[in-house]
């Protein structure tokens, strides 16, 4: 979802996380997050993608591991990796837009064969219940929205808008 007026991003940190938040949120019910991972440290490209997602209205807030501190996340599978939490409602259109954004902006890792990893959407209630690692079972995954082999959207909410722009046509 894009806005005519780009939103500003507020940033702050603590020893565990670096937080990003829209200066004005759209008030959607945030119930969970897509999780993406990378090798430490968090690059400026990842930070720019987070800011872009917030400024354009795809999400209202996100956070990533604070790789600049010496803190190690006790729930991390690999201490050499960071995690980015892309917070969202679990409404299909919101998740579709977020999934498309993550793929289009290279935030989802690929296998050696070039297939996208089937990343999970994790409900905040699962986090509060301590569901990590093998105890965590995702109800929603990237494959619900994106074909992992082709990277094409399954229900592309932005396709007609992009097509019209490319072809110079209107609604």
Image (cartoon, rainbow, N blue to C red):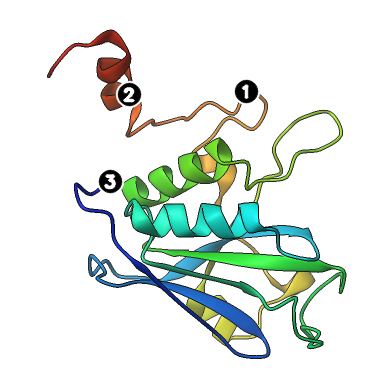
Estimate the x, y position of residue 154 in percent, counting from the top left: 46, 30
58 shown above or below 75:
above
Q: Quadrant of the C terminus?
A: top left
Find the distance from the CA under tag 2 to the CA under tag 1.
18 Å
Q: Nearer the viewer, mark 2 or mark 1?
A: 2
The answer to whether any part of residue 139 appears in the image is: no
Report which residue position mark 1 lands on: 150
Locate residue 44 relative to residue 61 in the image: left or right.
right
Camera-side residue: 138 or 119?
119
* Crowd around label 3: few <14 · some 14–19 · many ≥20 (10 Å): few
The image quarter in which residue 13 lies: bottom right
Give the Cα distance between marks 1 and 3: 25 Å
Disc on the earlier residue, 2 or 1: 1
Q: Classify mark 3: helix, strand or loop.
A: loop
Q: Which residue is mark 2?
A: 162
Q: Mark 1 packing: few (<14 Cα in 10 Å), some, or many (20+)?
A: few
Nearer to us: label 1 or label 3: 3
Numbered circle sitting on residue 87: none
- Residue at 62 percent of width and 23 percent of height: 150
**Kind of element beneath mark 2:** helix
Note whether 164 is above or below 85 in the view shown. above
Under tag 1, what secondary structure?
loop
Q: Say above or below: 35 vs 129.
A: above
Residue 169's image quarter?
top left
């Amino acid at each position: 979802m894009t806005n005519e007026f780009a939103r500003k991003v507020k940033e702050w940190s603590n020893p565990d996380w670096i937080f990003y938040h829209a200066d004005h949120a759209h008030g959607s019910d945030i119930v969970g997050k897509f999780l993406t991972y990378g090798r430490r440290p968090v690059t400026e490209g990842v930070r720019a993608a987070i800011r872009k997602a917030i400024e354009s209205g795809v999400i209202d807030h996100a956070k990533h591991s604070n790789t600049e501190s010496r803190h190690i996340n006790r729930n991390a599978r690999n201490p050499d990796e960071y995690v980015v939490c892309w917070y969202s409602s679990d409404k299909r259109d919101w998740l579709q837009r977020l999934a498309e954004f993550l793929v289009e902006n290279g935030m989802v890792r690929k296998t050696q064969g070039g297939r996208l990893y089937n990343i999970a959407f994790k409900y905040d209630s699962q986090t509060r219940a301590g569901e990590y690692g093998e105890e965590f079972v995702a109800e929603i995954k990237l494959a619900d929205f994106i074909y992992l082999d082709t990277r094409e959207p399954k229900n592309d909410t932005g396709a007609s808008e992009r097509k019209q722009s490319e072809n110079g046509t209107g609604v």
